[in-house]
Amino acid sequence: MNHISPAGDDKELLNKFLKDNQLFYGPDPEIMRDHCIGPRSEIEDKILNGGLDPHHVNQVRGLILAALDEGNTMVEQMGAAPGAKWGDIVASIYTANGDLSMIAPHGVVGFAACCHYPIKFILKYWEKDRTVGIKEGDGFIHNDARYGGIHNTDQSMMMPVYWKEKLICWVSTTIHEGENGATEPGGMPPSAESRFDEGLKMSPFRVVENFELKRDLVTFLQNSVRDPKLQFEDMKVKLHAVLRLRQRVLKILEEHGEELLIGTLRKNLEDVLIEVRRRIEELPDGTTRVLTFPDSTLRENALLKFSLAITVKGDKMTCDFRGSSPEFLNRSINTNQASLKTMFLTAFLQNIWPDLPQTMSVFSPIEMLFDEKSLLNASDDTPQAMSLIPIFKAMTIPVIPMTKFSYSLPHRYTAVVAPQYDQPATFIYGGLTQNGENVGNFCADINGNGQGGRSHRDGEHSVSPPFAAVCDIGEMEVIEEELPIVRLGAFTLAKDRVGFGKYRGGLGYEMISSVRGTGFWGFMTGCTGSLFTPSQALFGGYGPPVYALSKIRDINIFNELATNPGKIKFDILDLMNNQPIEDGRYSTHEMAMTFEICQQGEVYMMCQGTGAGYGDVLLRDPALVIKDIEEDLISHDTAREIFHVVFDSRTLIVDEEATKAARAAERKSRLSRGKPFDEFVAEFVTPEPPENLPYYGSWDDPTIIYGTSSGKRIKMKATEIQSMFMPNPKDVKISQLEAELLATRAELEECRKHKH
């Protein structure tokens, strides 16, 4: 029987039926793959073609930025989440069509850059839906990164602003809330094996009507998380911040009129777009490349390729991420391309063009290329709770190829800086507090990453996370009032764990923590960089070292301190090497750790990382080397063996001539150790990744992708990537133990045979 297609009125009726009865409004690929600003609306075109007074535009722009700064400060002052208190927040304003125009001067760029996705979803699907609609007094919430976001711990409140019954713009606030009901507390579960383990996955929906939270929906959300107080408090905080923003915008409309406000928001976008095209055009044509490797899925060790090639031709730039690792069906480290782009934007607005207004139009002239089903462009069905692993790389590695483009320019827009330490090194926690409250969140140490060395001076110590220059690490006295975590130590900078160079990276600090006052508590981490150096250096510098997680279990440190406090020095190297506490179970691991229950007084230790070094270590001023010794940042051995400085151990006076001779000898030694490039390639390069190497991504050909799924090596075309499936580490361990047991039984049986 031939299929008969409907025609005329029947076809129109069928299309209406299908539209009115859509099964599921999932993430819209058309929205999620588009990082460019939309075309002008009819009113924007009319206003801009009519001409705007630049002085009036500047005045309105200043008023908007002041309002955003006020909204950002309100969230920081009132927020309950650690992320709110220490600056993991933003306030933003968007055009009526949902394009991000401005963010608060001290906000997190990535948070704002991702909210245009849910706003555009709301406009496309809910505005004309008879069961939803958009009206004055509405507020929408969302957190699912698949609809636009970084990861599901971040919750956004978005509100339309109306003037004379006309939609003028949108305002939003976002907080890294942390706890969201995921399979592990704190919202960032390394053990998530599907998206259904991630906890709350809020597609954009209305939670505010007539400027008030709907308590039925609030209760539903509270009932879905471990910390209902946190959920309610910060929903109120975000709402009142957007209400204040709305109030300020209405005041601007009263004083300056709707055309100037609408025109300013759009002109801000287009002015930046024009400037970015100009800056691209002044770069030399060509391609620069960089690659790096997260070294863990957070459940097992693996080399996951993150590949980036940036090509400039005229006023166009292409960022090519093809050849990167395939996605993982049952590991939480995937990210979608929209999330990756928001943090990639952060790299440009903090380290490459930091003088530009912070708006999404920075990326409008830039094309981005991805393989389907790659780690950086994962499908919606993959878990993405720990997307931080690839997107932290996205905030740091663009510095390398962009510096190579811009280094020779007569004018640069920022100092050249080597990559910042790019891992979320902190403890995530969960359990009952000393006050009997159920909580789960993360420690703000994530905000203390070391800066990379710069072309003119050393990097700053523990200055900020790569995603926001003004976040804070928090005050332990405040934290200890709310949580049973006790910090054993004073944020000591990690001596010798440095990204060396002509200018060294800024150091990170040690975190030595324990817990008391609770009968139920646990820690986990979500960090790589224990096997492969986390951040690459610039122009001959050294990357930071790899870092470990250490523990002392089966002890109560508080009993030890009560009986013999002078016996213990709270220094990770001293504690682990000298093991001063008898009967303690000392262990060192990779930094990735799924949630585990700890007992009162057990000690957990990790180190915040160092920024990468800039330039050759042999070019470092010996006076700076000695200064680092005096400040206890490096040891005498490091000064001699790495920097080849000769000095008196007691007086620290440098022998200038002996230092010159030592460095000259090292240069000769380098030449003797070196090999011609062709000879090196012939010895070192293999046709494929070694079989024993858990390697994911392209090797020498970006069109061929390697991976290991269900324990078997797979070789794929980049156009036909298969999702990787990893066995449960517990099952792997059980299989290993069973094999050992069988082997032992066989040995015993052999012994019995020989005995008889």
Image (cartoon, grey):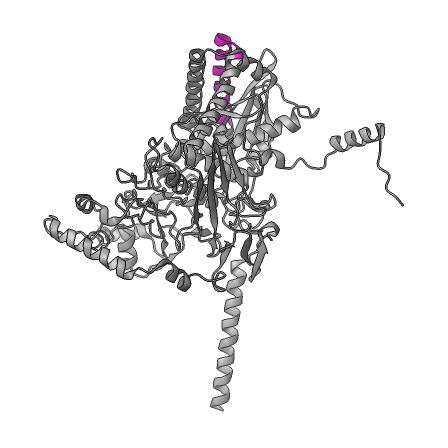
Residue 486: % across, % down: 34, 44
243 in magenta: yes
Outermost residue on the top side: it is 255
Residue 708 on image: x %, y %: 54, 59
Image coordinates for residue 549, horizontal then vertical, percent: 37, 53
**Nearer to me, 104 or 732:** 104
On screen, residue 265 above or below 465: above
Residue at screen point 15% across, 52% down: 659
Residue 440 seen in the current view: no
Tell me which segment is drawn in magenta: 236-259
Q: So how many labels did they put on this image?
A: 0
Of residues 100 and 437, the one nearer the viewer is 100
Q: Main secondary structure of the magenta part?
A: helix
Q: Residue at x 49, y 77 (%)?
A: 744
Specify the farthest residue to the bottom. Answer: 756
In the picture, measured across the screen, residue 574 lies left or right of residue 207, that is left
Q: Is residue 160 magenta?
A: no
Residue at point 60%, 31% (across, down)? 204
